[in-house]
Image (cartoon, rainbow, N blue to C red):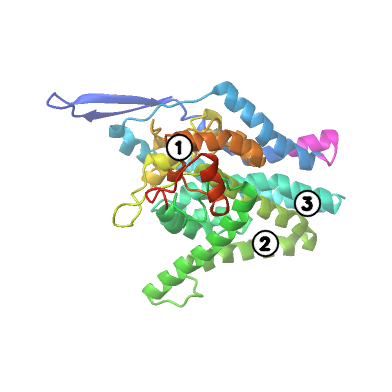
Amino acid sequence: MSTYSVEAPVGEKLPQIVEWKDGKKWAWPLALLIPSAAFVVWAAVKLWGPLMWVVVAPVLIYVVLPVIDAVIGTDRNNPPEALVPNLERDRYYRYVTYAWLPLQYGVLIWACWILTTHHLSHWIIAGAGLSFGIISGISINTAHELGHKSDSLERWLSKIALAETFYGHFYVEHNRGHHVRVATPEDPASARLGESLWSFIPRSVVGSFRSAWELEKKRMNRKGHRTFSIYNDFVNSWAISVVLFGSLIAIFGPKILFFLVPEAIFGFCLLETVNYIEHYGLLRQKRPDGRYEPVTPRESWNSNNVATNVVLFQLQRHSDHHANPTRRYQSLRHFDESPQLPSGYATMILLAYFTPLWRKIMDPKVLAHYDGDVTLANIHGPKREKILAKYGAVESSKGRG
């Protein structure tokens, strides 16, 4: 553990030394085991055959990680605010995120080489694409961490991390769309009470794509640039993907598309599944002037499960992230008023795939969060009347977003 200290005034008393140990400091590089898991897959393939391309990665994420989450448990420890500037100046933490990218692309190129130089069926290659989509999907989380920072290097690294999934517009939409409209019906990336994951994903994918394009179109107009310009972050981020995919096809042949396409699709769908979890049913209320109230810790589902927080750079402390988007992952805080998920994201992602089970667990939690007043929730439009009737609720003008 590393100790951070600073002199901090306490009332009228003399300055006191505030000390705090980051118990997870040397655990953060464990996140790099996610892309490195590709070599575990390869070892399993050598031992048990090609089917392991399809099986091992999902088992690691959907079985092994939730078990580790359950065994290790949770941690609500927060760094003292007086120490946050010191903590954020420690470049060790950002170097851990930087290290993700060479691993991400090293594994990608290695997988392309292995899959095209061995005699594998197209369906095994496609199955490998789905498995490796877990890695590229989690890479979007690294892009998310980097993309919120003011440093231009980190912003470009964010776009590079997104290129593998052809989801570069996330850089635009998440920062300037989702963070503005979060927990409102106008936000495509905020899931509504009663909405299944399977209806949410296409709505969020299409809505986020359109929103990102409109946001950049307006920004280009304000700056006097043409819409189709290299300065357009939508255009230049997608251009990186085009160059990446074109290069891989040129090197490994068209057959590699059986790997790249499923990998990209599953990768961004994994991101959207996390989006689904993060704000399900939560709604910012409107003020008397018709504008939404500011974002508070109550509009994001949180989890303090240690294992998934380490591999996801504390994405699960999501309410503090929305309150302070530029705050680095090592400084994010737990808030008692934030609604808490029953487990970490690895478990919740699996639950989200099964709509009846998800709703049985999460709908009552949404209701409890609003003290039984379901009209205060963000309710799925087509099911609104049915949900209101289920809970014997009367429409509330305050609760409507």
Q: Which residue is disc 1 drawn over? A: 317
Q: Which stretch did the figure color magenta?
A: 41-51
The label on residue 230 is none
Q: Nearer the viewer, mark 3 or mark 1?
A: 1
Q: How far apart are marks 3 and 1 (CA)?
A: 34 Å
Q: In this view, does 219 lie above or below 268?
A: below
- Of 113 and 193, which appears nearest the observer? 193
Q: Is residue 4 magenta?
A: no
Identify the residue at horizontal 59%, vertical 21% (top origin). 71
Any part of residue 122 in sight: yes
Identify the residue at horizontal 51%, vertical 67% (top origin). 213
Which of the two labelled residues, at mark 1 and mark 2, occupies the earlier sequence position? 2
Any part of residue 101 in sight: no
Is 240 displayed left or right of 247 in the figure? Answer: left
Q: Do the residues labelled 1 and 2 touch (CB within 8 Å)?
A: no
Q: How far apart are marks 1 and 2 (CA)?
A: 34 Å
**Most extreme residue toward the top, as rendered?**
71
Is 156 displayed left or right of 80 in the figure? Answer: right
The label on residue 245 is 2
Badge 3 density bin: few <14, some 14–19, many ≥20, Cα 10 Å: many
Identify the residue at horizontal 37%, vertical 73% (top origin). 222
In terms of secondary structure, what is the magenta stretch mainly? Answer: helix
Kind of residue at disc 2 = Phe
Kind of residue at disc 3 = Ala
Which of the two labelled residues, at mark 3 and mark 1, occupies the earlier sequence position? 3
